[in-house]
């Protein structure tokens, strides 16, 4: 006689079989869909995919399109950090080694060279080997007009010029930077024959402007008394209420910077003069473009720079004779602050 299965047990078995079939169906559907998708998708050569390191390198070398300096926020670094090769163009009774050392001590400065502009005038090609030009005078330039023409061309190509006193003497004086520099409105200050021959310090200034970043002290005793040119903006004055630092937007979206103090060989100066120069470079190195041809970026192993220039405008180690000092002009009365 055939043994009968308990109806209750039979019901459990049927239910368990149903659940098992349902579970197998749920698992099989995604597997079938995946196989179908793999048949339709093309094979990818993983060797052609960029590695993480190559993506990182690409991010580091991406270039941001340059904007005119007048449109850049004060805290924007376009292609930083910039590195700087600086040329001091001087017409003076001695070498501006203190200013040279002050600039060289700043971060990202790889060289600071000297050019004696009493004996010659640098060509545009020579200027374009540098990122920042710092011209100043205490005696007449060899050719103030050609110097001004070349500096204007240099700025047009994206170069940075930080003009210092006494090169604001004029108008038309051989001690001032003339030519297209003034006729084309590149000068940050209007020229005059007025001077300060008294010690001064840093007075009121705009600490939020990039030209004054980290600047806490500026001391000297010689200065042009001049006013910012049309369109220029003053960012610092002396304790005597005379204008000290200003910038001026010029043609082509570029900007020039002016420092009215004389900080050359005959000055008793101290403070952050070098920092102001390099601050100008940090602010304008992306917004003003890059000089053409692009200056070499390879730093020299030695920090010392051998002065000065020969009459052929090529720097050499040959010292020049000390010029006979010219009488200083009688200072005009300074207007009351």
Image (cartoon, rainbow, N blue to C red):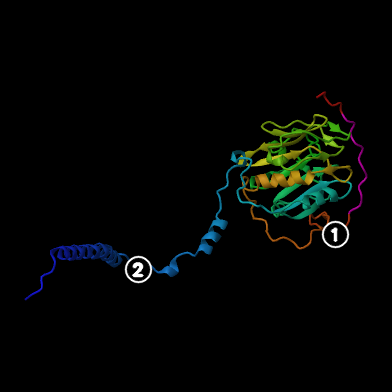
Q: What residue is shown with label 1?
A: 317
Callout 1: SS: loop
Q: Residue 18: horizontal and vertical position, in percent?
A: 19, 63
Q: Residue 250: horizontal and vertical position, in percent?
A: 65, 38
Return the residue found at the far bottom.
Answer: 1
Which comes before the other along the chain, label 1 or label 2?
A: 2
Q: From mark 1 to mark 2, how far is it between C-alphas? A: 68 Å
Task: Return the residue nearer the eye: 30 or 191.
Answer: 30
Q: Residue 45: horizontal and vertical position, in percent?
A: 40, 69
**Disc 2 crowd, CA 10 A, few/some/many (<14, 14-19, 20+):** few
Magenta highlight range:
320-331
Return the residue found at the far front.
Answer: 1
Q: Residue at x 62, y 41 (%)?
A: 69
Q: Mainly helix, strand or loop, the magenta region?
A: loop
Q: What residue is shown with label 2?
A: 43
Is 326 within the magenta? yes
**Disc 1 crowd, CA 10 A, few/some/many (<14, 14-19, 20+):** few
Q: Residue at x 13, y 64 (%)?
A: 7
Q: Is residue 147 visible?
A: no
How many numbered circles does the render carry?
Answer: 2
Task: Return the residue nearer the eye: 90 or 270.
Answer: 270
Front disc: 1 or 2: 2
């Amino acid at each position: 006689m055939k043994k009968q299965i308990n109806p209750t047990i039979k019901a459990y078995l049927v239910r368990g079989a149903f659940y098992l079939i349902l579970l197998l169906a749920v698992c099989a559907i995604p597997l079938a869909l995946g196989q179908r998708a793999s048949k339709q998708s093309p094979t990818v050569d993983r060797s052609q995919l960029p590695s993480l390191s190559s993506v990182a390198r690409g991010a580091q070398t991406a270039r941001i399109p340059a904007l005119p300096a007048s449109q850049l926020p004060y805290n924007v670094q376009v292609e930083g950090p910039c590195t700087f090769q600086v040329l001091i163009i001087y017409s003076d009774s001695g070498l501006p080694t203190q200013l040279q050392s002050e600039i060289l001590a700043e971060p990202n400065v790889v060289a600071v060279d000297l050019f004696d502009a009493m004996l010659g005038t640098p060509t545009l090609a020579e200027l374009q080997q540098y990122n920042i030009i710092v011209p100043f005078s205490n005696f007449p330039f060899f050719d103030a007009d050609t110097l001004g023409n070349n500096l204007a061309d240099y700025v047009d190509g994206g170069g940075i010029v930080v003009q210092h006193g006494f090169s604001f003497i004029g108008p038309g004086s051989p001690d001032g930077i003339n030519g297209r520099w003034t006729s084309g409105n590149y000068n940050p200050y209007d020229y005059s024959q007025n001077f300060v021959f008294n010690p001064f310090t840093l007075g009121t200034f705009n600490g939020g402007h990039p030209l004054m970043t980290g600047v806490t002290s500026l001391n000297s005793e010689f200065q042009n008394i001049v006013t910012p040119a049309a369109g220029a903006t003053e960012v610092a004055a002396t304790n005597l209420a005379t204008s000290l630092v200003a910038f001026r937007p010029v043609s082509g979206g570029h900007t020039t910077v002016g420092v009215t103090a004389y900080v050359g060989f005959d000055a008793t100066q101290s403070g952050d003069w070098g920092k102001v120069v390099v601050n100008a470079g940090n602010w304008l190195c992306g917004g003003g473009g890059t000089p053409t041809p692009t200056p070499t970026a390879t730093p020299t192993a030695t920090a010392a720079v051998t002065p000065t220039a020969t009459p052929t405008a090529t720097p050499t180690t040959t010292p020049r004779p000390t010029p006979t000092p010219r009488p200083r002009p009688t200072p005009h009365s300074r207007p009351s602050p």
